[in-house]
Amino acid sequence: MKKFSLVVFGKIHVIFLTLLFVFQTNIDISAQSLNYTQSNSGLQNENWGLFYSEIEFADVNADGHQDIISIGDCNSPDWGIHGIMVYFGDGAGHWTLSMNGNFGYGGIAAGDVNNDGFLDVGYGMRNNNTTDDFGDQTLEVALGDGSGTTWSPWDDGLGNTGSAAKMFAADFADVDNDGDLDIGSTSPDGLTGTQIYLNNSDGTWVQSFQCASAGAYDVFRFGDLNNDGFMDFVTDSDLGTAYFGDGTGGFIHNDQGLPTLDSLKRRGISIGDVNNDGSADLAFTNYLEYHETGQLNVYVFDKLQQQWNDFSGNLPDGYPDSYDLTDISDMNMDGIGDLVAMNEFGSSGRFTVFLGDGNSQWQETASVYLPDNTAVALDLTAGRDVDHNGYPDILMLKTIEQTVMEYHNIPDLYRESSEPSALSVKPVFPKGHELIFQNSIRNIEWVSAVPAGEMSQIRLEYSVNGPAGPWILIAGNLPDNGCYQWNFPEVVSADCYIRYTVFRGREESQCVSPAGFSITDGTIGIPDVNNDKAVVRVFPNPASNQIAITTTSSSNGFDLVDVYGRIVMQFTDVASSPFLIDISSLSDGIYFIRMTSQDGSSDVLKFMKASE
């Protein structure tokens, strides 16, 4: 499962481009509405048994249409649903199933792990009960050949064989910023914990991190929660939710500020940017154990205080408006993250879309009640546009009652039903303020609107000198499927933009990222968080051996704090100004200077230690 502020240096650019899409913030959302139509022709299969599985969008055969992927069955292969499952989409809401392998059930993710241009899959599973290499481990990666029907194991060092150690939800990300995708997964009910493996780019993997987990196994997602350029992850373990990466494959848990897990549980976890600061924010449901339904929560991470802050605003706070699953996505394509939430039980089952304003206020715009035979919703995802109408659609996996006391799983797809009148394209990621390391892998994402007719394609370009260019080609004649995996270039700039051009025949439309993002080698993207108060300053920044601190107020001392909130140095005798600190022994990375004044106030300043 899946879903991601800094100072931007340089001039403010004013540009005029034909068909340029510009995002707005703090917009009036009260008049906007979305409507959804069920499009599940070909998705139902009465042989698919029940129990949890993960379901995702991916264009596995690169035809420009979204496909749906999942994995196996609880009794694979005995019940006829098994292995890697691909529902090929035709762009109009019709689906055709292809299966490969004798294993299941569990979690799945798609990405190009060997950088050959074809989508591959990674999956954690409970039933690794085959005897050959394809399906004998609890966590695997298999290479695709572009067809979506043939897969080759590429998984030495991953997971375990045998029946004792099971895995489930899985996701890909470039954890160590070395230009290839790594994999993470979590185990059902905490049997083997959460595990991260680094990609050696030769079909072998090495574990870089493992931690205990307990109580759930539905969610594992990578994203940059604190916008430091290092991938973090979230999971729905009862032992903790958010884990922050150090860029080498290590992670530290920090749930500070989130509701307690003593009596309440966090379920249906998702991530996405709801306030346009470049960080991936957190959504979840909060419920009492055994009641399994509850209020909606959205939290954003305060990088200076190293804690989560409530961003839920006016979202429903419990019964009768109780929910179980969430997903953050820009559903009305206004440039601001929205919230999709789902209630899972029986005839009351429904999904609801809440439009965000970027300021913690939410407006319900659509609420769709599901058929009476819905028993349990297992997974929910949004963000991809299956019919190219310019708005993301909603995909869920649910268990339905086939006959009395007999149930089976089916995917269910709800398309936003508006019809596009003109060719257009809008950016999804990056959309501004993100910090991304050079040579690392991230996805470029977009949504296009294409009136009925010819197939469309995409051309992607980038600028490191602002929104006016000059533009450098990333790739042309790409399938218009909303996602392109890019190895970010070896440049350093805080004024980067992506230009998207959608075209069919001679007709084209174009847009540019609404705000700049940064590509860094570790030496830019460090905002001075104290610009408004000339109280404390640090220089040079970045620094390699020594920093000097100046202050205009009387101080009780300084703390030097790392990105995880740990005090690594303390100073009480700070009468001299500038005050010099030897940082040569510190590891490279971001740190904070926290000063407490004699009047009790405090100031925080960020700096970077970077070796020469």
Image (cartoon, helix red, strand yellow):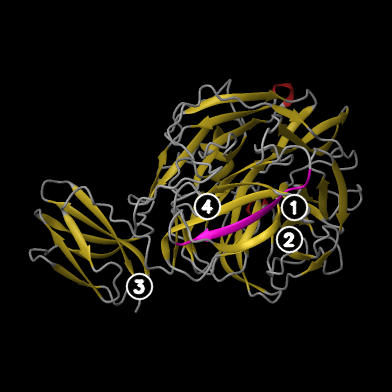
Instruction: Give me the C-alpha separation between circle 4 and circle 1.
Output: 20 Å
On residue 59, the disc is 1
* Amino acid beneath label 4: Pro
Q: Is residue 317 above or below residue 279?
A: above
Q: Are marks 2 and 1 in contact (CB under 8 Å)?
A: yes
Tell me the tag on residue 610: 3
Q: CA distance from mark 4 to mark 3?
A: 26 Å
Which of discs 4 and 3 lies nearer the camera? The answer is: 4
Indicate which label's residue lies in the foreground, 3 or 1: 1
- Mark number, residue 119: 2
Binning the other alpha carbons within 10 Å of mark 3 as few (below 14), some (14 to 19) or many (20 upward) gives many
Q: Position of residue 188 (x, y in %)?
A: 68, 51
- Tag 1: amino acid: Asp
| Residue 284 in the figure: left or right of residue 309 | right
Cα separation, mark 3 vs mark 2, equals 36 Å
Q: Please state if 122 lies on the left or on the right of 565 as rendered.
A: right
Give me the C-alpha separation between circle 3 and circle 1.
Answer: 40 Å
First in sequence, mark 2 or 1: give its number.
Answer: 1
Q: Are marks 4 and 3 in contact (CB under 8 Å)?
A: no
Q: Say what amino acid the circle numbered 2 marks.
A: Leu
Task: Find residue 328 and report its horizontal and vertical position in percent.
Answer: 57, 40
> Residue pushed farthest front?
506
Looking at the image, which residue is at 71% across and 49% down? 506
